[in-house]
Image (cartoon, rainbow, N blue to C red):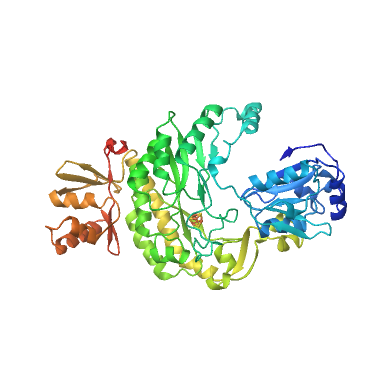
Amino acid sequence: MEKADGADSGHRGTDHGARRAARADRPGGQAVREGCGWIQRLPGPAYRLALPGGGGQETVPPGDHCLRGSSVSERLGRGLLEHFEVVDYVVNGEGERPFAGLLEAMAHGRPAPEPSDVPGVFGRSVDGRVLGGGRSQLTRLDDLPVPDFDAYFQELRECSNLRTILPQVPVETSRGCWWHRAHSGRPSRGCRFCNLNLQWRGYRSKSPGRVADEIEVLSRKYSTLRFAFMDNVLNPARMGAMFEAIAGKDGDLDLFTELRVPVPRAVFSGMRRAGVRRVQVGIEALSTPLLEKMGKGTRTIDNVAVMKRCEEFDVENHSNLLLEFPGSDASDVAETLRVLDFVRIFRPLRIVRFWLGEGSPIAENPGAFGLSAVRNHPWYRAVFPGELAERLPLMVKTCRGDRERQRKLWGPVRDAVRRWRRDHDAWKRRFPCLPLLGYSDGGNFLLLRDRAVSSGAPKTYRLKGISRELYLACDEPRPIADLLREFPSISEVKIRAFLEDMTKKRLMFQEGDCCLSLATHENIRRFCPPPPG
Ligand code: SF4
């Protein structure tokens, strides 16, 4: 909680008109702004205390209270104004311009601005109606200043027991999601479970050089090498150049980012050289029909490819497998089990169950997914008293639907992932620094080693001549038609027979008419930048 601007009026009234009148008496009043993160619904204990029976409103800091953040956009923000007398304004969506506008209005003789005075701000009229809203976004993210974390680092220095921690600093390279499309007049699209984009309209990203400079400035200023990209999704058109620009700076960075597939090998390689050590990829499912139901716009084969890249470049993959998506069926489960048999050589995914989020496409149209009776999750009753837990628009929802059927349906996948985890741990204990399926290139032959064995030596395969070339040609997902064009001297029958044999041995993965080699290069040269040109 931070105070911004002006003198303390000490006003703590509870009547709308009285609050506004009091503000009108004190030009240049005080604004208290509170951040509401994605998880954090209320900005600290002050508001909790303001609840009936929670300690009384006299505990709330004086001033005009303005909330902003990812969890107070649209209905969520309006609801707070409608139910919490102590909240005066809510910034709707992106905060810089609306909050600056609000401060300016308060500081320059407009001490009690009507909400409609400041685009992007919800507020109350004299008679207590919630007004305003709309959006006011920056056009260019490069115009933003480098974030200032002085207060955080000062606090760390002051806490003797925290001095040894190595903080991870957030970096924002973009806002919104280019895949999520709503409010644009064009057909909407986006992941149907996702509500991460309530805060933004459209997609914008910083230029690659700006991101690299920002990280360099923050690293030197705060003596830290650990950064986490806060983006919903990186800009695919810029991420290659961005990671090359970061890799070109001094500093052994330790980076985390989220990713959306596909990620070409060259980009992944640059990402690793820039310092990315951990990723969370929007994998969600290992069945393309299920990915379609989810609105992901991705394919299983691209998910398998990114799991392989993580293995190849020694990047920890902390991605999820989303189970119990409404409307998923036995064929989705069967396909997932089939694919799990191929990816057992990669780091296991983490299982998460579907949950319904406010503002997600499913929550907006639950009937289309067989859901009904959508309301706030009962766990909010632990925080909000009485009816408020029902009436206040809140982030996590519960509903009626096919939940129990889904739970049973996905049981075999839960068991298979448990086995995957157990086996993978055991194999990695035997071969800690090597890929479970790796290859070494002899120039005109390949040696493949399958170390996913619980005892004895790894299984070894030798691919010679054209077999080696075909295998290497499928390092990225390749349509078979491409291979037929690239290897005109080999008959289609022979190519298909080779791919079939490799797939049976779990050395390649096939989806439809597309195939992917699963073994990763073991040679250290894989980390080298590609030769110029
Ligand atoms: S899950 Fe990721 S890719 Fe999908 S709509 Fe949300 S932010 Fe975009």
Q: Is residue 529 left or right of residue 118?
A: left
What percent of the width, then of the height, locates residue 426?
Answer: 36, 45
Judging depth in this view, the residue of 499 and 486 nearest the camera is 486
Q: Is residue 183 left or right of residue 241?
A: right
What percent of the width, then of the height, locates residue 373?
Answer: 63, 71
Which corner quadrant of the image does residue 333 belong to?
bottom left
Identify the residue shown where x is 51% and y is 40%: 228
Image height check: is 63 above or below 283? Answer: above
Identify the residue shown where x is 87% and y is 45%: 25
Q: Is residue 469 left or right of residue 402?
A: left
Judging depth in this view, the residue of 198 and 140 nearest the camera is 140
Quadrant of the image for the N terminus? top right
The residue at the far front in this view is 109
The residue at the far left in this view is 489
Identify the residue shown where x is 19% and y is 53%: 470
Q: Is residue 22 left or right of residue 396?
A: right
What percent of the width, then of the height, locates residue 257?
Answer: 47, 44
Q: How many marks?
A: 0
Image height check: is 242 above or below 290? Answer: above
What percent of the width, then of the height, locates residue 94?
Answer: 62, 49
Which corner quadrant of the image does residue 30 belong to?
top right
Q: Is residue 227 visible?
A: yes
Q: Is residue 426 visible?
A: no
Quadrant of the image for the C terminus? top left
